Image: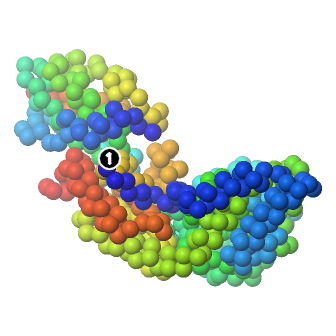
Amino acid sequence: MKLVYLDNAATTAIDAEVEKFMQKCQLGLYGNASSIHKKGREAKEELEKARKVIAKSIGAKEKEIIFTSGGTEANNFAVKGVAFANKGKGRRIITTKIEHECVLNSCRWLEEQGWKVTYLGVDGKGFVSGKELEKAIRKDTVLVSIIHGNNEIGVIQDLKELHEICKRHDVLFHTDACQSYTKAELKAEWADLITLNAHKIHGPKGVGALYIKERVKISPWQHGGGHERGMRSGTENLAGIAGFAKAVELAVDDKEGKKRMAKLRDCLISELLKIPRTTLNGPRGERRLCNNANVSFAGVEGEGIVAALDAKGVCASTGSACASRSLEPSHVLIALENNPERAHGSVRFTLSRYSTKEEVKYAAKCAGEVVEKLRKISPLESERER
Amino acid sequence: MYVDKVLKRFQKPKFAGELKGADAIGEVGNVRCGDIMRIYIKVKAGKIADIRFKTYGCVAAIVSSDYLCEMVKGKTLEEAEKITAQDVVKKIGEIPLVKVHCSVLAQDALKKAIGEYRKKKQI
């Protein structure tokens, strides 16, 4: 049975070239980048080369890039680090109802410590309103954190507009760009802090970065020997970081990649919408991640669809992969519309640069079969037939 | 998260579908929780002669419905009522802990169907 992997928002397969390069680094550049000897210097050189690649990819300065163990750590660092460093000014944070769990749970933890958090709602397509953001800002607001490309429904927020509002009110603006990085236009000037990661773009797992604009007040979150300019201690994961940079180079070099994925995405969406009583979640076109298709099938539950698709060799997911550990329907889908059937029936298909038209067509065909089969045994559907 | 046995059963349930001419139907759950289970029974000489289910829900919900049907078919109503959700979970074997509650619902639906049958027959 062939395998069609359409869960690239959860993680991607590592690129062979990246893997090869990492192995070379792992074997050859074993030195600690903080050491003064030859092996240390070699490692340091590669580390700084990687930093340059990441910085350049978003138009940042090299010293504004701090490597982390991934997106989750970078988001925790951004939210908690800014909150603690600026608590003299105030203890209020604004975020949205459609953030990734690592931002939401960092905010909830801060609430337990006495911070006040506002969770902005979104419209029916998932967009955050600039007006609502502006209304929510108070004198003691220190941080606004809004996800760039949403991991579940693919909606892309207008960072430029949101950041302008924050600047007007002298509030720091952070964005989680794990899903959008190299898949949508992203500029350092659009935010004060940006979370990036490697494993969504065919890089290794366990590596990410936080862009921190010069002069942004942030407290380090991981203390130790003062690595990463004192912002993130711990011996740098050199092979991982080098692999991250290689993955970024490959993604940036593939200039047609985005267009190709967007075309495939639209093909997949239109095929899926041919299945009766199927709704698209999130917007269409330019404001949607080029690799995301998320639909809800009425009368059936997402987990069953994913399990049945898996039996046909198609890897997809219900909402976010993290949500599969809980029984709650997706908080993102519920934020779009308080419709539990739509939330429970949502399935996400996410493409990669290597996805093909054949794969997309096969996945949509399987989805149609699986949904029909599960609807036959759904009590919700027999009501509708009557 | 699911073991092979559970997934195989999910692919090929033995008791899924509607039972034409059922003597009683029991339904529990709601769409908000993401689980709805409906059990159809046919009763002959005090025994469950035939049984089917329709389930809207996760893999565990569908599989536990199917196992429950298998376990109670041919049993008297009293015997069927005595089967607990734990018995169903045991029969399934390995099931993720967060999913155990899904298998309680099938039993509730069965009890409701038996209750309805008794009400109809006034026994």
- Depth check: give the residue in front, A42 or A320: A42
Q: What secondary structure is found at the residue carrying circle 1?
A: helix
Residue sitting at the far right: A36
Q: Position of residue A142 (x, y in %)?
A: 77, 67
| Residue under the point 71% across and 59% down | A241
Total of numbered circles in the picture?
A: 1
| Residue under the point 41% across and 32% down | B95
- Depth check: give the residue in front, A109 or A338: A109
- Depth check: give the residue in front, A129 or B123: A129
- Identify residue for label 1: A311
Locate residue A153 relative to residue A375 in the image: left or right: right
Q: Image quadrant of residue B41?
A: top left
| Residue under the point 40% across and 77% down | A263
Q: Image quadrant of residue A163?
A: bottom right
Given the image, on which type of amino acid does mark 1 rest?
Ala
Q: Is residue A143 visible?
A: no
Q: Position of residue A285 (x, y in %)?
A: 44, 79
**In the depicted structure, whether residue B66 falls above or below residue A292:** above
Locate residue A16 relative to residue A81 in the image: left or right: left
- Depth check: give the residue in front, A170 or A46: A46
Q: Residues within 10 Å of mark 1 (few under 14, many from 20)?
A: some
Q: Position of residue B85 (x, y in %)?
A: 35, 26
Locate residue B50 relative to residue A347 in the image: left or right: left
Say which quadrant the C terminus of chain A sits in.
Answer: bottom left
Locate residue A204 relative to residue B50 in the image: left or right: right
Image colouring: rainbow
In which chain is the residue bearing label 1?
A: A
Q: Is residue B34 visible?
A: yes
Q: Position of residue A328 (x, y in %)?
A: 47, 48
| Residue under the point 83% across and 73% down | A214
